[in-house]
Amino acid sequence: MNIYIKNTKEIKKMRISGNLASNVMNMISKYVIPGTTTEQLDNICHDYIVYEQNAIPGCLGYHGFPKSTCISVNNTVCHGIPRKDQILKNGDIVNIDVAVIKNKYYSDTSKMFIVGETNTLSKQLCHAAKKSLYITFKKIKPGIPVNIIGNTIQNYIDSTPFSIVKEYCGHGIGKNFHEKPYILHYKNQDTTILFKKGMIFTIEPIINAGTCEVFCMNDNWTICTKDDQLSAQYEHTVLVTKNGCEILTKRTQEKIHKKYINI
Ligand code: MF3
Ligand code: CO
Ligand code: CO
């Protein structure tokens, strides 16, 4: 099996790490405006994590990733590399994905930002991606198969015009950035893995406006939609509690609960 169950001491550290990652999201929000480059956003996040939080950017150097955050604009699905020639413009939709290492423990979260004002489709796509994550929190409790997450997300997305990217999944997280259990965001029959108290993992559905098909660019990182249409993603790090779950990367202001009691 090899799924690491976190003890009280580890959970304490994961809470601290989760708070730091969520604080980065709050901090960066005012800079996501027309004219800013994705490299500038990355530099601001890097300096904040390193010098204000005394923490380590989890993405920097991970499998050779060259920057401290993944920034994925419009038709970029995930793993966008921040660049100095990528200037944000009015109407763009931007995912910033931040991982932080504090006291050896990772946390991982991402959200969509809208640059200036955007159109109805962009707003609806971001809303659907956010909702597809949020509705899973009410389903998590010990003893339930983890496939409830993919089933819940797909039941919802099937009721929209949008599609779910299949290539990327949620993941256990702790001393490793990515560890078991791996959590699919689409309908599946795997009932072998059950939620257990002390399990910590991410949920990070990627939702496309058009086809779910994606491809990797020549930089070997940036993932884009095949049809060039928009993509949106939200991610939180979640702890399974005795009767539900706790959102370790919840932001202040975010309109969700910190703790869900699902029994
Ligand atoms: N943060 C991504 C995730 O949600 C992983 C990025 S790996 C990197 O799992 F190397 F691109 F940073
Ligand atoms: Co993740
Ligand atoms: Co992430």
Image (cartoon, rainbow, N blue to C red):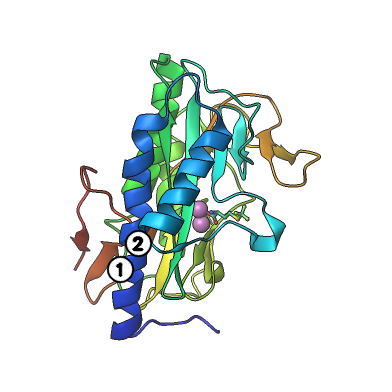
Marks 2 and 1: CB-CB under 8 Å? yes
Using residue 138 as the reference point, say whether residue 168 is left or right of it: right
Quadrant that contains the C terminus: bottom left
Name the quadrant containing residue 195: bottom left
Residue bearing mark 1 = 15
Which residue is depicted at the point 37% across and 59% down? 53
Query: Is any part of residue 160 visible from this angle?
Result: yes
Which residue is depicted at the point 19% across and 53% down? 257
Q: Amino acid at mark 1?
A: Arg
Name the quadrant containing residue 139: bottom left
Quadrant that contains the N terminus: bottom right
- How far from the left and from the top, in percent, is residue 39? 58, 36
Residue bearing mark 2 = 18
Vertical relation: 241 (above or below) 68 = below
Using residue 263 as the reference point, say whether residue 49 is left or right of it: right
Which residue is depicted at the point 56% across and 67% down? 178
Circle 1 residues within 10 Å: few <14, some 14–19, many ≥20: some
Instruction: Indicate the secondary structure of the residue bearing disc 2.
Output: helix
- How far from the left and from the top, in percent, is residue 205? 48, 47
Using residue 144 as the reference point, say whether residue 150 is left or right of it: right
- How far from the left and from the top, in percent, is residue 113? 41, 31
